[in-house]
Image (tube, grey):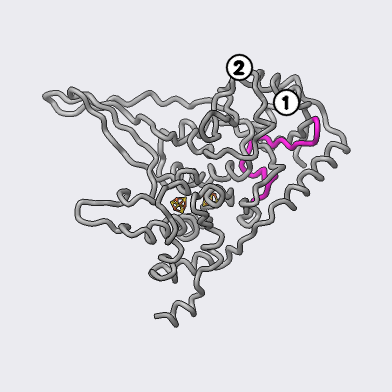
Amino acid sequence: MKKTHKIKKQDLTKLLSEWSSKFTILTPSQPEGATGWAKWDGTDTTFLDWYRNTTVPPKNIFLPLMEKLFSFHKDREGYHVEAPPLGISKQLVFGIRPCDARSLALLDMTFRDAYEDPYYLTKREGVVLVGLMCTRPYDSCFCTSLGSSPDDSSHVDLLFTDIGDEFLIEAITDKGEELIAKTSVVQATTEADEARAKEAKDLAHRKVTREIDTSGTTEKLLASFEDKGYWEKIAAKCISCGICTFLCPTCYCFDISDEMVNKRGDRFRSWDSCAFCLYTKMPMENPREEKWRRLRQKVCHKYEFYPMSFDVIACTGCGRCVRLCPVNWDITQTLANLPAQEQIKQEK
Ligand code: SF4
Ligand code: SF4
């Protein structure tokens, strides 16, 4: 059984302060724009009042919106590269939701397992993930259909569960246990605390009401890949804004650009989106000029290509693409209405 502790909510500032001597603490943040993640200011824990999940997912901690990869300069001998020093960064992400912690495990498959991306890994390897169980899932959330849940502890080091005036803390990994054991503000839990945590978790599970059936989805997508009629209908109202990809925690398309002045330059990596027509434009052709091909790419990346490459669906059911799309495109409907293979054969 996992070891548990508890902390009074009013002592959270003390706990984060203790941790801040070793880590840069990141918490949910509500600037003037979209909610996201920012360095903790040393006192503010009011995010506990408004936080359900952030609009901008935590992927930007590991894959920043724009990141300098290296500098370079040119002289008579040619180009010279000056790579930045890459040390493991020590960050603690406080309050990450289980679905978003899971998204990082999915990103690892591309940026650690398939290809070792040093920029991603230096941020990812030193991080501590302190999860906060979801007590108020959105009606667009469907994490339980993807094998996760509001209290999924699979990808965090510690999991906090709201039990009223206190949090119950589960140490999930050795790193988490070590971290919590060294703090001065936690207490031992009682059976009554455990019962309150179970009640909170059961209630949260019941609040996730959106469901999708993922069985056979990959095969259906394979079969309907060239079903232009279906995909055109699905993409008809899409305005190619890219929100469903930029704000998807498992989307990672990027562009590379150079800025050069007087023979000195910097190379940057920045977020891009398969929703944009120019993303796949090449000198001779653009394989995804039509909108339906681009929206199909978004869906197939999650539910066809990732399962075929890594044996896992690259969607966490966080629901961001459902609740943030300006024209109410809904991936769960797209998947639910995929034509059956027999239907596609008849149409042909
Ligand atoms: S968020 Fe909606 S409108 Fe924007 S690209 Fe995605 S599906 Fe299209
Ligand atoms: S596809 Fe939509 S629901 Fe799935 S992880 Fe991305 S934003 Fe979340």
Left or right: residue 75 compared with residue 153: left
Quadrant for the N terminus, please. Answer: top right
Q: Position of residue 308 (x, y in %)?
A: 46, 60
Dividing the picture into quadrants, the one containing residue 11 is: top right
In magenta, the rendered stretch is 148-165
Closer to the camera in the image, 120 or 97: 97
SS at mark 1?
Answer: helix
- Foreground: 139 or 283? 139
Percent position of residue 50, x then y:
66, 34
Q: Give the percent coordinates (x, y) of residue 201.
A: 76, 45
Nearest the viewer among 55 and 142 is 55
Asked if the magenta segment contains residue 64, the reply would be no
Check mark 2 vs ligand 2: CB closer than 8 Å? yes or no.
no
Q: Earlier in the sequence, mark 2 or mark 1?
A: 2
Q: Which mark is residue 21?
A: 2
Which image quadrant is residue 30 in? top right
Magenta span: helix, strand or loop, mainly?
Answer: loop
